[in-house]
Image (cartoon, helix red, strand yellow):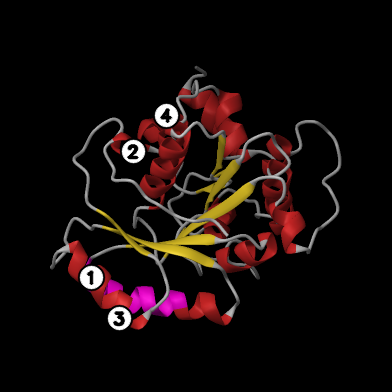
Amino acid sequence: MQAAGDIHRRTSGDRCAAARRSGAPFPARRTDRSLCRAPVKTLFITATGTEIGKTVVTTTLAWQARQRGEQVRVLKPVISGFDKDTYDESDTAQILRSLETEETEAAIDAISPWRFKAPLAPDMAAAREGTTLDFEPMVEFCREAESGPEGLLLIEGVGGLMVPLTETETVLDWIKALACPSVMVAGSYLGTISHTLTAMETAEKHGLDIAAIVISESEDSPVPISETANAIGRFLSGVSILELPRLAPGCAPWQEAPDLKITIP
């Protein structure tokens, strides 16, 4: 594996380079939903906020699909708080390990080409490094992945649904551009019911297809996770709500998680 210093040095350069390694132009923008999703099933993992549990859900879905014999590709195109000194705890590292993929610099680039050191919203983190995050290359990077041989493509967002990516676009705009179904990850902390209902109302207003809500148990959960799920469910009839109990610290939590049965439209 490349040294952590070598891994991080690539974060300060042109983020488009990794996404366009072949030198070929990005494909033309596609707006038809069926074309966007073909030939693989795509699922975007977003959340009501940051540090909620997106990566646990992403790695669990990837692991469980692989155990069913499915070919899976996972992307976390944008990551903030990526530091060479804490690489082992990074979301990208966890994703690679859940895929049982060798942790090389090329593998990291293939999952997370846009990496920033500051643990801030991407637009702010990019500004700290004297650069900006371009929206269209991010979208096209995901679209190119949809033409791969895998049957399932998981795309993990950054932060919550309304986190700014650029001066004018948010994660919500990213999902709308891809026109793919999403999973909304929520916590079970005090206040999560309001946060989840607000995020879901925003998603519905903008026509997002939410395949399921996953309640990821928070460390400071004031009530049992089932009680939180039931309370949210009273206001969101017809939406699949799944529970993900807090897992004991370990090197492979995705192997210990209960089955997350999510139907991708």
Q: Residue at x 57, y 40 (%)?
A: 112
Q: Residue at x 72, y 50 (%)?
A: 38
**Among numbered discs 1 and 2, the one appearing first in the sequence:** 1
Q: Amino acid at mark 4?
A: Arg
What's drawn in magenta, residue-wise? 189-200
* Magenta residue check for 214: no
**Residue in the foreground of this view, choosing between 2 and 71:** 71
**Among numbered discs 4 and 1, the one appearing first in the sequence:** 4
Point out which mark residue 130 bears.
none
Q: Tell me if 106 is positioned left or right of 47 in this view.
A: right
Is residue 2 depicted above or below 38 in this figure?
A: above
Residue 236 in view of the camera: yes
Q: CA distance from mark 1 to mark 2?
A: 22 Å
Residue that label 1 marks: 228
Residue 80 on image: x %, y %: 48, 49
* Element assignment for label 3: helix
**Among numbered discs 4 and 3, the one appearing first in the sequence:** 4
Q: Give the overall secondary structure of the magenta segment.
A: helix
Residue 237 on image: x %, y %: 38, 79
Point out which mark residue 254 bears.
2
* Element assignment for label 2: helix
Label 2 crowding class (10 Å Cα cut-off): few <14, some 14-19, many 20+? many
* Element assignment for label 1: helix
Q: Amino acid at mark 3?
A: Arg
Q: Nearer the viewer, mark 4 or mark 1?
A: 1
Point out which mark residue 234 bears.
3
